Image (cartoon, rainbow, N blue to C red):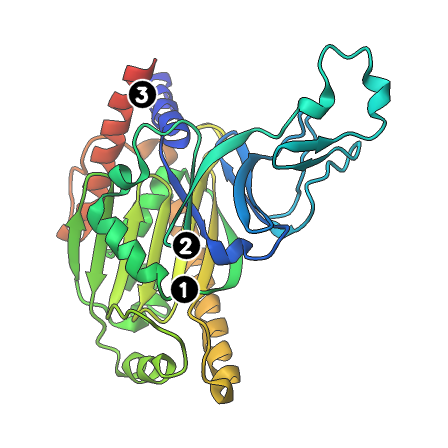
Amino acid sequence: MDRNRASVFLMIQSVCVQNFWHLVCHRSSVAAHGSYLRVQLGKYDLFVHNHKGQLSCYVNKCPHRSSRIVDSVSGKSSLQCPYHGWSFQPFRTAVPRSETFDESPRDPREAFLDQWFLEDHSGFIFVALKPLFPLIEQIGKDSSLLLERIGSSLQDCHSSQVIHYDASWMLAVENALEPYHVSKVHPKSLGTVGLDDGVDTLWDWSSLWHASSANARISRVSTLIKNCVDLRDQIGGYLSLYIFPFSMLSSTESLSFALQLYQPSLSCENASTSLLTTLYTPSIVNERMRDSVEAFYRSTAEMNFKIFEEDARISSLVYPDSWSIEPLTYFSTLELKINHFRDCCKKALSLSCGLV
């Protein structure tokens, strides 16, 4: 990647990571006391943690000697550094052998984990370091209302998976934004849903693709599952909501929702992306059908994993230096959201110039 292109890439990524809100999970991912979910946004290693129902987003680095506090993608743990045993709670830090720090220039008990801002929007957890906009202004009123509708039904975190892309986050996101490739890349996975061309809706920093399915089996299964779960609001067909810069929420018939977080690597030289995808579901209310419904959700998670693996493979074939901030030279109407994404990147670049 030439120097000018790399500079543009890094400026866009920097403002995207530091100055936007990021949809990282649903509250059900960290429902229990002590549970956490770890995410990587560029150079920032973060985790969302539940302390007696209070959610916080921390930088995953002990203020003492910079050890990681948590080392897995998710789990349940007290906030204790594995190196020297410093432990952290909101407004309180416990330091073993604190009397040995008498000559330290600062009292270690006044050291806390660095935090990001966190907002809970209808159960969806957003985090930000130095946001340029209030959350609702960034995601927009229509996206906000859609998240409220979706959030009313989601109670359970079914499963999380990580897929690695040998492609920049920009190429990974663009692949996910367009359905033009579905018949060629996903003939035996997403292609079997039988989606039509759908309708695109574009907002300032988000977009939506809503399509209908011609698959009669999906219609029959949908009717069966809907009678077995606590589905408080139903959105028919297939939808994919993109929230700039790194998050996408998708569903077929509202039976479950898959949240994709495209976690960018540290730099443009390392053209890789780590996709954290999590499947969220309504609660099962028909106990006689529990085994069948859980089997359905397992197959959904397996199908999603297959689709994202296929996406990762095809994205790796795209030359890393081919990405541009300019609109596509040749674009199908099914790739409209790519040009919208690039326009968002261009706006982000303008914002980054103003922040220098």
| Label 2 environment density (alpha carbons within 10 Å; few <14, some 14–19, many ≥20) | some
The three-letter code of the residue at mark 2 reads Gly
Q: Disc 2 designates what residue? A: 123
| Label 3 environment density (alpha carbons within 10 Å; few <14, some 14–19, many ≥20) | some
Q: Nearer the viewer, residue 92 or 114?
A: 92
Q: Disc 3 designates what residue? A: 352
How many numbered dots are placed on residues in this image?
3
Residue at position x 29%, y 48% from top?
242
Q: Disc 1 designates what residue? A: 154
SS for dot 2: loop
* Residue 280 to residue 71: above or below: below
Residue 50, horizontal then vertical, whole percent: 57, 48
Disc nearer the start of the sequence (2/3)? 2
Between marks 2 and 1, how big is the CA–CA gap?
8 Å
The three-letter code of the residue at mark 1 reads Leu
Circle nearer the viewer, 1 or 3 = 1
Between marks 2 and 3, how big is the CA–CA gap?
30 Å
**Image marks 2 and 1: residues in contact by CB distance under 8 Å:** yes
* Residue 86 to residue 222: above or below: above
Q: Nearer the viewer, residue 261 or 169?
A: 261
Residue 255, horizontal then vertical, whole percent: 36, 71
**Image marks 1 and 3: residues in contact by CB distance under 8 Å:** no
Disc nearer the start of the sequence (1/3)? 1
The three-letter code of the residue at mark 3 reads Ser
Quarter of the figure with residue 283: bottom left
Between marks 1 and 3, how big is the CA–CA gap?
36 Å
**Which quarter shows the C terminus?**
top left
**Which quarter shows the N terminus?**
top left
Residue at position x 64%, y 31% from top?
61
